[in-house]
Every structure is written in structure tokens, then in C-alpha cells.
Image: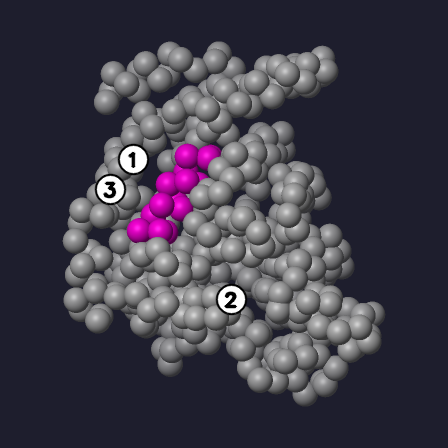
């Protein structure tokens, strides 16, 4: 494979710094979600899979297997109360034994009966206080686990015209989230997620990236926007949103998945891998132009309803890794020159050349240095782990 890598290097355009690209890939980190290892389903049915994780500790076991196969998934996001335990220090210690850390803490503000009309935006201050107390509890969990990210998605909205007052709900949300930001330590962040629709079908209180970013701007430096790839209307130019948020210093994190119609939560890169590449192209360009680490929290958020859980997670990690590798191989100097000269075809050709490039030799080289299998998904499928957990967990 050394010969293949040498040939790969020679084939790159002169404007590509392969050493820098390789270093970036070696330092790449992607967080996996605890809920991605448990049983899940649609609004119509939960599909039970043999071996699906039942406890936070089994979820950590599965996450450790993904990290063992890929070498770039060292942290796990928790969802509260789905991952609620009496002793979070025990969770931290168990994660450390598996060479993992605890990542983002995600409050659940959409399952309690009281939240039928909203949580932080609810017209009843008693319900708003219940939701706020839950978030403050999650911040306490952050302090115990060492988490630096509070990841917030609200299902709040209305289903019918006149159901509630738009501006009153907006003010309730601002008021409660100011309390949340005040409770965060200086090195902790609130990442505000948004969603075009569902479960609210008339209006959603945080329906798009502009609403989330306006709110984050009002809340100050501790608040940023979280981009979920499935939370946009069809045809939305997500890479443009990413570029704007980078420029405003408000890009806090990603929830990687893929969509065909709406919030499908498909495995990343499964429907539009070129879009994923173009998003990473903006991330790489932004970091290069600003000459700094963007401090973006990269996390997978998928619902593996019919695919085996761990294998699907590895599949997504490989897709993200490949998209990043290709974006790192864009000849940026040539691209800028083509853009300055108005050479539309030339500029697009430069991007397509990077996207169409087979990055297997580069990824194999990186994985060898990370001391992980050169073909992670294949290695996992041959490992016997899926059969093992199916026997042990039932």
C-alpha cells in the first residue's frame, strides 16, 4: 500500500499540502450519540434489533467498538433522561476504561405530557420552570462528566393558527435561555438547534438557522448555532449557511445525518455525498482563511431503524472521514484564481476533481498511523461483535 500512497501523492495538484491534510485527518474527531446504539423507530413503530444497547454502559461498549475500528470517535453524547443514572462519576470512569470521554449533554424537552403545548415557550410558567430545571440539572451533569457542550433542541411550536402568541413565546424562550447561559461555566457552550417542522406543523419556535443564530447572538458568546443536516426545507443550500455561520463566529456544531425528504435521519452521506463534501469544503476553507481552529463540535445524530446500529455508525464515520479528506485536497490557490477571473467552469472543475478523487490510499495511510483497521466497516463485520452482543443482550 506504500506504493499506492506514493502514487497518490504524485497525482495531487501542486497547490495541495498533503502533509497538512494528513495531519488534519489524524486529528479529526467525531462524536457518536448514545441513542444511536439503542432501539429506535418512526412515529409509527419501534423496530427492535437483537443486541441493541439497553443501558448507558452498553451504549458506551458499542461506542468503544466504533472508536476501536475508526480511531476518531473518542467521545459519546448523552441524552437525559434516556441515559439517566444515579452515579454519573461511574459513567465517566467506565468511559475512561474504554478510552472514551463524555461529550455533549442533550436535555429532553419533548416527551413529558406537560410539554404538549411547549416547554420553554409554554404559556404556563409552571411548565416553563419544569423545563428550565431539567436543563439546569443537565448542566450539573455536565460539571460532573466534564462536558463542555449543552446541545439543545426544542420541539416547541403550535399546530393551529391562533393557538398562542408568537412574540410572547419568543420572549419566554429568550428569558429562560438567559438563565441557562448564566448557569454555564465560561468554558461551556450552549448549542442551539433548529428544525423546519415536526412535531409542530403550524409554526416552530426555532424553525431555521436564522432564528437560532439571532437568539444565540442575543445570548452572547456562550451561545452558538448547531446545524443538523436533516432540519432544512428541501433544496436549502446548507453549505452557504455554514459559510455564513463561520463568518459570524456562530457555528457551534453539527449533527451529521442524511435526508431525502425531511428529517429522515439516514446514515451520513447515503443520499447526497456531494453536499457533504461541499459542506466540508466550507469548513476547510473557513479554518484556512481565519487561520484558527473553528472549535466546531462534530457529532453524528441518526436513527438506525433498520440498519444494524454499530455498523451503521461506522459507515457514517467513514463517509464523514472521506468527505473531509476530499475537501482537504482542494487546490485552494487555483480555486481562488479561478474565482477572481470569473472562470466558472474552471472553479467547478477544481472542486469536482477533489470530490472525484479516490482518497483510499490517504485514508489507509492515516488509519495505519492511528493503528486501526484499514477498512473499518469490513473489519467490524468480520469481528463477531454483532453476533456477540446479540447473544448476550438478547
Disc 3 secondary structure class: helix
Given residues 207 and 260, the one toward you in this image is 260
CA separation in Å, label 1 and label 3: 14 Å
Label 1 neighbourhood size at 10 Å, few (<14), some (14-19), many (20+)? many
Judged left or right of residue 357, residue 58 is left
Label 2 neighbourhood size at 10 Å, few (<14), some (14-19), many (20+)? many
Q: For the point 31% across and 44% down, which residue is it?
A: 70
Would you name the residue on which mark 1 appears?
Answer: 367
Judged left or right of residue 186, residue 10 is left
Label 3 neighbourhood size at 10 Å, few (<14), some (14-19), many (20+)? some
Residue 316 counted in the magenta span = yes
Q: Is residue 2 visible?
A: yes
Q: Nearer the viewer, mark 1 or mark 3?
A: 3
Displayed quadrant of residue 188: bottom right
Q: How many marks?
A: 3
CA separation in Å, label 3 and label 2: 31 Å
Would you name the residue on which mark 2 appears?
Answer: 106
Residue 30, image x and y in percent?
Answer: 43, 48
Q: Is residue 141 visible?
A: no
Vertical position of residue 343 compared to residue 65: above or below = above
Residue 394, image x and y in percent?
Answer: 21, 71
Residue 351, image x and y in percent?
Answer: 55, 23
Would you name the residue on which mark 3 appears?
Answer: 378
Q: For the point 26% across and 49% down, which residue is it?
A: 68
Range drawn in magenta: 311-324
Disc 2 secondary structure class: strand
Disc 1 secondary structure class: helix
Given residues 202 and 10, the one toward you in this image is 202
Judged left or right of residue 389, residue 71 is right
Amino acid at each position: 500500500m506504500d506504493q499506492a500512497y506514493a502514487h497518490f501523492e504524485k497525482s495531487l495538484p501542486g497547490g495541495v499540502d498533503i502533509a497538512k491534510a494528513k495531519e488534519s485527518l489524524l486529528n479529526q474527531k467525531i462524536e457518536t450519540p448514545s441513542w444511536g446504539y439503542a432501539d429506535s423507530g418512526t412515529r409509527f413503530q419501534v423496530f427492535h434489533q437483537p443486541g441493541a444497547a439497553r443501558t448507558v454502559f452498553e451504549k458506551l461498549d458499542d461506542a468503544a467498538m466504533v472508536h476501536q475500528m475508526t480511531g476518531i470517535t473518542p467521545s459519546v453524547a448523552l441524552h437525559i433522561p434516556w441515559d439517566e443514572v444515579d452515579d454519573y462519576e461511574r459513567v465517566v470512569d467506565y468511559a475512561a476504561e474504554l478510552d472514551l470521554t463524555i461529550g455533549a449533554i442533550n436535555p429532553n424537552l419533548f416527551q413529558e405530557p406537560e410539554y404538549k403545548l411547549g416547554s420553554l415557550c409554554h404559556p404556563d410558567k409552571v411548565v416553563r420552570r419544569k423545563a428550565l430545571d431539567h436543563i439546569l440539572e443537565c448542566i450539573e451533569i455536565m460539571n460532573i462528566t466534564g462536558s463542555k457542550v449543552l446541545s439543545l433542541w426544542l420541539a416547541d411550536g403550535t399546530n393551529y393558527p391562533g393557538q398562542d402568541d408568537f412574540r410572547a413565546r419568543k420572549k419566554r424562550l429568550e428569558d429562560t435561555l438567559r438563565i441557562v447561559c448564566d448557569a454555564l461555566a465560561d468554558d461551556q457552550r450552549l448549542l442551539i438547534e433548529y428544525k423546519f417542522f415536526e412535531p409542530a406543523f403550524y409554526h416552530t419556535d426555532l424553525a431555521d438557522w436564522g432564528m437560532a443564530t439571532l437568539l444565540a447572538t442575543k445570548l452572547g458568546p456562550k451561545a452558538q448555532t448547531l446545524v443538523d443536516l436533516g432540519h432544512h426545507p428541501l433544496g436549502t443550500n446548507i453549505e452557504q449557511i455554514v459559510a455564513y455561520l463561520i463568518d459570524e463566529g456562530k457555528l457551534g456544531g453539527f449533527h451529521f445525518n442524511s435526508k431525502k425528504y425531511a428529517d429522515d435521519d439516514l446514515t451520513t452521506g447515503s443520499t447526497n455525498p456531494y453536499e457533504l463534501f461541499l459542506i466540508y469544503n466550507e469548513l476547510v476553507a473557513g479554518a484556512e482563511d481565519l487561520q484558527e481552529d473553528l472549535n466546531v463540535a462534530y457529532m453524528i445524530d441518526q436513527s438506525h431503524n433498520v440498519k444494524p446500529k454499530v455498523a451503521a455508525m461506522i459507515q457514517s464515520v467513514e463517509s464523514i472521514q472521506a468527505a473531509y479528506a476530499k475537501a482537504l485536497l482542494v487546490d485552494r490557490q487555483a480555486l481562488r484564481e479561478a474565482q477572481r477571473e470569473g472562470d466558472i467552469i474552471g472553479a467547478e472543475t477544481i472542486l469536482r476533481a477533489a470530490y472525484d478523487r479516490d482518497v483510499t490510499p490517504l485514508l489507509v495511510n492515516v488509519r495505519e498511523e492511528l493503528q486501526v483497521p484499514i477498512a473499518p466497516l469490513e473489519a467490524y463485520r468480520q469481528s463477531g461483535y454483532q453476533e456477540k452482543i446479540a447473544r448476550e443482550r438478547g
